[in-house]
């Protein structure tokens, strides 16, 4: 199943923000920032990327249902493997 780019727009925007945030974390490291501040910001980037992954899975499932494919056509083992790659 291919994801509709229009449905992915919010995910793309979230990932672009995370990308910018990661660049800020790298800059903090280059500037010798406080360890706690760096780790706090890195955790925020990590959470944003994780949420993006879950949003992709949820959007894909929603797309299957709206296109009438139903969940019966979804390979449960494949979906579980994809979901666990995010864990």
Image (cartoon, rainbow, N blue to C red):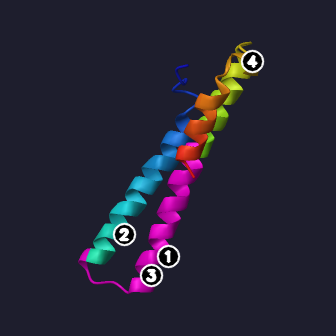
Q: Residue furthest top?
A: 68
Q: Secondary structure at mark 4?
A: helix
Q: Is 5 above or below relative to 20?
A: above
Q: What's drawn in magenta, residue-wise?
A: 30-53
Number of the front mark, 4 or 3: 4
Q: Secondary structure at mark 1?
A: helix
Was residue 84 drawn as part of the magenta stretch in this picture?
Answer: no
Alpha-carbon distance for marks 4 and 2?
43 Å
Do the CB atoms of the residues marked 3 and 1 lie less than 8 Å apart?
yes
Tell me which residue sits at (46%, 72%) in the image.
41
According to the picture, the residue beneath numbered tag 2 turns out to be 25
Q: Earlier in the sequence, mark 4 or mark 1?
A: 1
- Callout 2: 10 Å neighbours few (<14), some, many (20+)? many
**Residue 81's quadrant in the figure?**
top right
According to the picture, the residue beneath numbered tag 1 turns out to be 40
Residue 72: image tag:
4
Q: Position of residue 7 (x, y in %)?
A: 59, 29
Q: Earlier in the sequence, mark 4 or mark 3?
A: 3
Query: Going by the image, does 33 lie left or right of 52?
Result: left
Q: Earlier in the sequence, mark 2 or mark 3?
A: 2
Number of the front mark, 4 or 2: 4
Q: How many marks?
A: 4
Residue 22: image tag:
none
Q: Position of residue 44 (x, y in %)?
A: 52, 66
According to the picture, the residue beneath numbered tag 3 turns out to be 37
């Amino acid at each position: 199943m291919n994801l509709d780019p229009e449905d992915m727009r919010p995910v793309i925007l979230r990932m672009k923000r995370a990308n910018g945030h990661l660049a800020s974390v790298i800059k903090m490291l280059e500037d010798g920032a406080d360890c706690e501040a760096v780790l706090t910001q890195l955790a925020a980037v990590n959470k944003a990327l994780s949420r993006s992954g879950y949003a992709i899975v949820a959007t894909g499932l929603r797309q299957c249902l709206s296109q009438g494919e139903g969940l019966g056509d979804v390979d449960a083992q494949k979906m579980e493997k994809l979901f666990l790659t995010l864990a």
